[in-house]
Image (cartoon, rainbow, N blue to C red):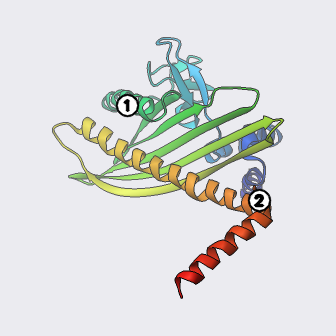
Amino acid sequence: MSDAQLDAALDLIRRLKPQDVGENLNTIIATVPELQEELLSSVDQPLKIQKCSQTHRDYLLCDYNRDADSYRSPWSNEYSPALPDGMVPSKDLRKLEVSANDAFDIYRDLYYEGGVSSVYLWDLDDGFAGVVLFKKGSPQSRDASGGWDSVHVFEAVDKGRSFRYKLTSTVMLSLKTSSTKLGAMDLGGNMTRQVEQDLDVDARDPHASHVANIGRLVEDMELKMRNLLQEVYFGKTKDICNDLRSINRLSDIAKDTQRQADVLKSMNR
């Protein structure tokens, strides 16, 4: 594998439709198999759902809970298909992972009212790292469909009395409509933002402190990114559509503009 091949593959994926990133990624890997590990760890793609065979609860699949061709369930800590020597967090970190999954499951229910969430943690030399995942799809219908996937990767580095949290969040959004009245529309894309912050950790109950700190960072980031999508991306799309094709007749808009000008002119006399 060469750096030129990897750069070319990543550049190609960026130029293709975001909605087809999974299919495009599989095609590139089939063409150049030696790029598989680098591409799977570098390219964000919509999350997939799998059911835990022991707890019968849904969990999300990503590169962070994958070992070889198996995926670890956050509920049972077991791999499917079974992988006896698969990577798992240390005993203490596993307790934190269980608490984080319970907390973010409540968060998911409050903010998403459905969908699936998963949290995976792994050990670092000077702390720990993890990922918080959310997936929500709209009810399937013939006229419209959509999906929201958010991936929050973080590091927590021990600084003595506090921890330094570095969060990298990616949101993938897809919208698709098709009807005789509105026609067909297929929009999709992703957005990534980062934040870094030092926060205190209570030595008497570090697990609760970590869950609260990570939860606050993820909540703030999701709200900011959602507002950006609504105000900037969709707002800009609306402005462009209005410039290209007016809903009302241009003659009526011109008359309204002239009336406003006349009113302002009379007020300034």
- Under circle 1, the secondary element is helix
Query: Which residue has dot 1 on it?
Result: 97
**Residue sitting at x 66%, y 36%:** 146
Q: Residue at x 53, y 81 (%)?
A: 267
Quarter of the figure with residue 49: top right
Q: Residues within 10 Å of mark 1 (few under 14, many from 20)?
A: many
> Looking at the picture, which amino acid does disc 1 mark?
Glu
Say which label, 2 or 1, has the lower sequence index: 1
Q: Residue at x 68, y 61 (%)?
A: 239
- Residue 26 picture location, percent across and down: 76, 37
Distance in Å between CA atoms under marks 2 and 1: 52 Å
In which quadrant of the rendered image does the C terminus lie? bottom right
Residue 130 seen from this side: yes
Examine the rendering and report whether any part of residue 25 can be seen. no
Label 2, residues with CA under 10 Å away: few <14, some 14-19, many ≥20: few
Q: Out of 258 and 32, give the one closest to the viewer.
A: 258
Viewer-proximal residue, 181 or 6?
181
Tell me where residue 207 appears, x and y as whole percent.
Answer: 27, 36
Nearest to the observer: residue 204 or residue 118: 118
Number of the front mark, 2 or 1: 2
Q: Which disc number belongs to residue 246?
A: 2
